[in-house]
Image: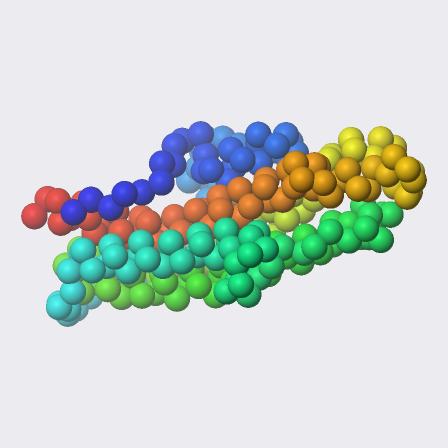
Amino acid sequence: MTLATPQVSLNGSKLIRFLSDLAVSDVELSHKHFSDRLGRLLSMSDSIALADAHGMLRRVKFEPKAISIAAINESFVQARATMVQMVINSFDSNATASRLKLPPPDIDGLTEKELAYGPYLRFYAAHQREFESRVQPLQIEIRTAISGVSPTLAQLAILDKALGETLLAHSRKCFAVTPRVLEKRFSQIYQQHFQHQNQPPTLSDSDPTLLWTAPGGPLEIFCKEMQGILLAELEVRLLPILGLMEAANEQEDRN
């Protein structure tokens, strides 16, 4: 059984392409010398931990479990769908079951860009905490499940655990950058709408503040972009689990 997966090309993940399309990042990404750059992330203790994990592969004791690849696929697909729906519902004012809710427009807060963006920064950070609380247990669940399918997948589970623990701190630092990059986009839209960076919006007959919050206005455009970035970040966070799933499905296809 082949699991339907998002397309990830050498040009980067959807998250990278999304941020690049917004033209708010001046970082040029390249896949050249990837192993060298990955190596620079690892400390001596990290390298020792990975070497120890690699040494364990010859001694791993395979314990088969009564679980099918189809069941593992279904568990992953359902968990992913739940997280995607969580993001979508958080932007829907009519979705009563959502714990996370998009902040309502704050007219008073528009007098300063930093105050205007603050609620959205906290909203995005809350989603990131929710992602982490859900993705890590899911990865452990899938890793444990595939380890009982075959000796090869049991070895892969050991390597995945070691690599995941080694790169956890680095991945958190990387994801912490995303809401700050999004802030640059908010600043672009804010300044374009209110014309002058140092002149805060004021209430008047032709109030630009009302236009800012109008349907189809700048704030709605920004929120749609933010939703796209959240979904793209979720895709990136799920990639290690997706790799485990693809390995399990490939082995089943060969059998």
> What scheme was used to colour the molecule?
rainbow
Q: Does 64 sit above or below residue 226? A: below
The single residue placed furthest to the left in the displayed view is 255
Q: Position of residue 141 (x, y in %)?
A: 31, 65
Residue pictured at 31% horizontal, 42% vertical:
5
Q: Position of residue 246 (x, y in %)?
A: 25, 47
Asked if residue 169 lies left or right of residue 219, the reply is left
Residue pictured at 7% horizontal, 48% vertical:
255
The single residue placed furthest to the front in the displayed view is 205
Does residue 58 appear in this view?
no
Q: Position of residue 153 (x, y in %)?
A: 20, 56
Q: Nearer the viewer, residue 223 or 243?
A: 223
Residue pictured at 78% horizontal, 50% vertical:
116
Q: Position of residue 91 (x, y in %)?
A: 57, 52
- Count of labels in the image: 0
Does residue 202 appear in this view?
yes
Residue pictured at 50% horizontal, 65% vertical:
97
Q: Nearer the viewer, residue 202 or 159?
A: 202
